Amino acid sequence: MLSERDQLTREDAITVASIERGVPMLPPARDLVERFHRMLRERDPDALPSWIADAADSALASFRCSFVVYAGAVRRARRRSSLPRPHI
């Protein structure tokens, strides 16, 4: 279901459409997963706050909670990575 939609066979596309009709929360969850993957691939931490907000009431809400809990640690790590490293 996460494969590139334009690369599905006709039969697979029909199967995916049928599943999505039966489980309406899947398409929004798939979109969130794709956004998350894109955010990681593009190394775009600025996209995280909007992803967190959009995932709040989704099928990925529990997955999203880990980012809310550790958001401060991520911010601190980003700040540290921009500081000059001490020479030891």
Image (spheres, helix red, strand yellow):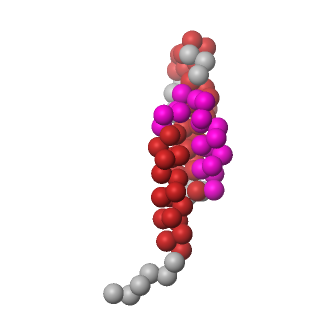
Q: Relative to 44, is 26 above or below?
A: above
- Front one among 22 and 54: 54
The residue sitting at 57% across, 48% down in the picture is 38
Taking the spot 54% from the left edge, 28% from the top edge, the residue there is 59
Indicate the position of residue 27 as horizontal and vertical percent values: 60, 26
Range of magenta residues: 46-63
Whether residue 69 sits left or right of residue 31 in the image: it is left
Find residue 3 and report its horizontal and vertical position in percent.
52, 33
Q: Residue furthest bottom?
A: 87
The residue closer to the viewer here, 3 or 33, is 33
Front residue of 26/61: it is: 61
Left or right: where 5 falls relative to 73: right
Q: What residue sits 63% from the left and 49% below the top?
A: 49
- Which quarter of the figure has residue 53? top right
Whether residue 60 is visible here, answered yes or no, is yes
Expressed as whole percent of the image width and height from the top left, the position of residue 45 reads 58, 56
Measured as percent of width and height from the top left, residue 70 is found at 48, 51
User: Is 67 situated above or below 46?
Assistant: above
Q: Main secondary structure of the magenta part?
A: helix
Residue at the image point whose x is 59% and y is 43% from the top: 52
